[in-house]
Image (cartoon, rainbow, N blue to C red):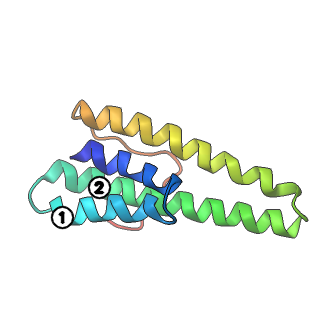
Amino acid sequence: MAMFCHLGSLAGYILPLGNILLPLILWLVNKDKMPFVNDQGKESVNFQISITIYVLASLLIGIVTCGIGLLLMFVPVVFALVMAIIASLEANKGIAYRYPLCIRIID
């Protein structure tokens, strides 16, 4: 289930804010039953909130620079994809994964 908290973030590539909502739902449903899912679910949700902030900041920079900076928006998107795959593989092994560049809002 912890692996699905990380893989659930890929829903953001299909649904707006799906990257936050699906891991959040999986975490909230299972956090009291499984301590590892509680830890990894919080980590996934925190990272997805962080990535959303980074993408919005990149978008703002792109608008201010008249579109030149819009290419910057793809950096956090690709980074999030790679990190979600790595985190899901680690969670599948039972290893707690900590995302780099993650703002830990939910503690």
Whole-percent x, y for residue 64 in the image: 86, 69
| For marks 2 and 1 on the same chain, the one whose residue lies earlier in the sequence | 1
- Quadrant in which residue 65 is drawn: bottom right
Q: CA distance from mark 2 to mark 1?
A: 10 Å
Numbered mark located on residue 29 in the image: 1
Name the residue: 56% across, 62% down.
52
Q: Nearer the viewer, mark 2 or mark 1?
A: 1
Whole-percent x, y for residue 76 in the image: 62, 49
Instruction: Name which residue type carries label 1.
Output: Val
Residue matched to label 2? 41
Numbered mark located on residue 71 in the image: none
Residue 104 in sight here: no
- Quadrant in which residue 33 is drawn: bottom left
Name the residue: 38% across, 39% down.
87
Name the residue: 60% across, 49% down.
77
**Quick one: label 2, few (<14), some, or many (20+) residues within 10 Å?**
many
- Quadrant in which residue 7 is drawn: top left
